[in-house]
């Protein structure tokens, strides 16, 4: 499985958010940049670090006219717990059937402590207002993810 290509239109996706509402990537076209990131599991240490970093820098993302969407295979109920426990103020999307995760090339064989298993590759896609992929981060550091993404948005000239 491979990632979509930088320069191409981002693959279409419509998923359910933590409020039970449908969210489509196309809704943001022409309106804002989008940071679409895939993470393995809500309420785990790495994913919590990553999400809280985004939460703590919401003003910087807003200033950069950038919407953050986070996708995991967790059910909506678990997303609600994640939001409530950590005061997350951005959109979390449930992809229980892995359709979007696979479409974006983020479902693959992983290795951990000598075991192999299928899982979500922690990956971030930066999408411009034109709906095109501007950058793909496949080496994500959970503790610096927010700062790394904001630096890339600046570097790519995506701020309005």
Image (cartoon, rainbow, N blue to C red):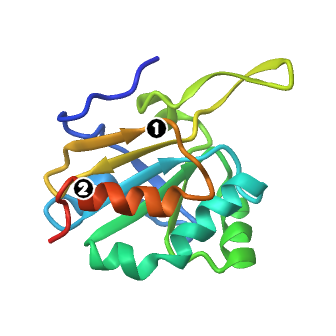
Secondary structure, mark 1, is helix
Q: Nearer the viewer, residue 135 or 24?
A: 135
Q: Nearer the viewer, residue 68 or 19?
A: 68
Q: Which of 30 and 126 is in front in this view?
A: 126
Which residue does the image show at 21% across and 53% down from the upper left? 156
Q: Which mark is residue 155?
A: 2
Q: For the residues marked 1 and 2, what is the alpha-carbon distance in whole angstroms?
A: 27 Å
* Mark 1 or 2, nearer chain start: 1
Which residue does the image show at 37% across and 56% down from the upper left? 35
The residue to which callout 1 is attached is 100
Q: Position of residue 42 (x, y in %)?
A: 71, 56
Which residue does the image show at 31% across and 67% down from the upper left? 66
Quadrant of the rendered image containing residue 49: bottom right
Q: Where is residue 5 in the image (x, y as percent from the top left)?
A: 27, 28
Instruction: For the C terminus, give its image quadrant.
Output: bottom left
Quadrant of the rendered image containing residue 51: bottom right
């Amino acid at each position: 499985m491979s990632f979509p290509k930088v320069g191409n239109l981002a693959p279409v996706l419509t998923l359910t958010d933590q409020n039970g509402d449908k969210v489509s990537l196309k809704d943001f076209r022409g309106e804002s940049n989008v940071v679409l990131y895939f993470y393995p599991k809500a309420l785990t240490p790495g994913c919590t670090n990553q999400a809280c970093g985004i939460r703590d820098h919401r003003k910087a993302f807003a200033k950069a006219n950038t919407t953050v969407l986070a996708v995991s295979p967790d059910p909506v109920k678990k997303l609600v717990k994640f939001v409530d426990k950590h005061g997350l103020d951005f959109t979390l999307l449930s992809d229980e059937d892995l359709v979007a995760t696979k479409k974006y090339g983020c479902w693959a064989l992983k290795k951990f402590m000598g075991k192999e298993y299928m899982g979500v590759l922690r990956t971030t896609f930066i999408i411009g207002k034109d709906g095109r992929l501007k950058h793909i981060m496949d080496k994500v550091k959970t503790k610096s993810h927010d700062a790394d993404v904001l630096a890339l948005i600046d570097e790519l000239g995506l701020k309005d």
